[in-house]
Amino acid sequence: MAKLIFSLVLGLAGICMAEVIYVDAGSPNDPGTGTAGDPFRWIQDAIDDANHDDTIEIQTGIYTGTDNYNLDPAGLAVTIRSTDPNDPGIVAATIIDPGQAGRGFYLHSGEGPKCVIAGITIRNGFTGASGAGIYCNGSSPTVINCIIRDTLSIVP
């Protein structure tokens, strides 16, 4: 009986393991599956596919288009990062660019410190409200080694 319970616990642990989900702006497939060999093209697709404790690894490139800005983790404790958040060259080359049509991240669902954004550049965000780079309302994510530049919030 103990063997059966142990096997069951190990089986359930395997189901709950965190995974790495990959995104590449140059992916030939739309949307992709999120594997290293078939990455998602859109960051929001990766977020929507993620579970708590997963890591979304964003390859270097410029991410534009509606599913690559106003990114909403919807309360997930997930890490969204470049391939090397500690390398300034990688950070500078991993770019979320809303093209002045929105903000980089929209965090409003109680995301806590286990929601991590690391090693990403956000540029050209624009909003008629607060937070053209990263908007936080009722959330407290961890933001590490990110660059936010050339963004504009017009707050009345």
Image (spheres, rainbow, N blue to C red):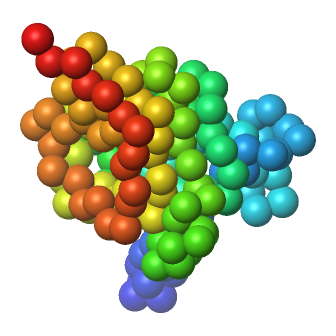
Question: If the image is split into quadrants, where does the N terminus sit?
Answer: bottom left
Residue 95 position in % (x across, y down): 56, 49
Which quarter of the picture shows residue 135? top left
Q: Residue at x 19, y 38 (%)?
A: 136
> Where is residue 150 drawn, in percent x and y?
41, 39
Q: What is the residue that sits farthest to the bottom in this orientation?
A: 3
Question: Which residue is found at the position 38% from the left and 60% from the top?
Answer: 146
Quarter of the figure with residue 129: top left
Q: Where is residue 56 in the image (x, y as percent from the top left)?
A: 54, 57
Q: Nearer the viewer, residue 100 or 104?
A: 100
The relative height of residue 48 versus residue 81 in the rendered view (above or below) is: above
Work out whether residue 84 or residue 108 is closer to the camera in this orientation and state it. 84
Taking the spot 14% from the left edge, 33% from the top edge, the residue there is 137
Q: Quadrant of residue 20?
A: bottom right
In the rendered image, the vertical position of residue 89 relative to residue 45, given as above or below: below
**Along the line of sight, the residue nearer the viewer: 43 or 145:** 145
Residue found 40% across the figure and 87% down from its top: 2
